[in-house]
Amino acid sequence: MPLFLIERNYAEKLELTVDGVSAVSKINGDIGVNWLFSFLSADKRKSYCLYEAKDPEAIREAARRANLPADVIIEVSQVRPELVLAAAA
């Protein structure tokens, strides 16, 4: 399944709750997208999330239903942190 990196910009600091994460996970499952991991900026106003999805429209639909921004969606070919670590050594 294709991989996508999503940049999300929040008007206010993002405050995560267990209930909120569960609700987003349910929506993602209903749409057929799979969250892999995220990075949250130090000021909690921006996140970068890696997802599996059939296409960008599925990500946009899940974001819309969850009332989350999906400001930039970029398809990536692969995630290989071991290659970056090896090159840096």
Image (spheres, rainbow, N blue to C red):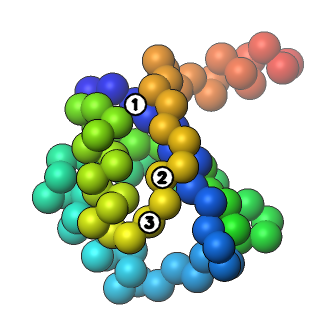
Give percent across and percent down for residue 8.
57, 56
Task: Give, as a three-letter code, the residue at label 1.
Answer: Leu
Between discs 2 and 1, the one toward the N terminus:
1
Judging depth in this view, the residue of 78 and 65 nearest the camera is 65
**Pointers 2 and 3 in contact (C-beta within 8 Å):** yes
Q: Is residue 34 visible?
A: no
Q: Residue at x 38, y 80 (%)?
A: 20
Q: Nearer the viewer, mark 1 or mark 3?
A: 3
Is residue 17 positioned above or below 7 on the image? below
Q: Residue at x 21, y 67 (%)?
A: 26
Give percent across and percent down for residue 48.
59, 50
**Residue at image mark 2:** 70
Give percent across and percent down for residue 39.
63, 54
Q: Residue at x 63, y 24 (%)?
A: 82
Q: Residue at x 26, y 43 (%)?
A: 58
**Residue at image mark 3:** 68
Q: Is residue 33 visible?
A: yes
SS class, disc 3: loop
Task: Give, as a three-letter code, the residue at label 3.
Answer: Leu
Q: Residue furthest left?
A: 30
The answer for how far apart the CA atoms under marks 2 and 1 are is 15 Å
Task: Give, as a three-letter code, the residue at label 2.
Answer: Ala
* Disc number placed over residue 3 in the picture, else none: 1
Is residue 12 positioned above or below 38 on the image? below
Judging depth in this view, the residue of 31 and 38 nearest the camera is 31
The answer for how far apart the CA atoms under marks 2 and 3 are is 7 Å
The answer for how far apart the CA atoms under marks 1 and 3 are is 19 Å
Residue 28 in the figure: left or right of residue 20: left
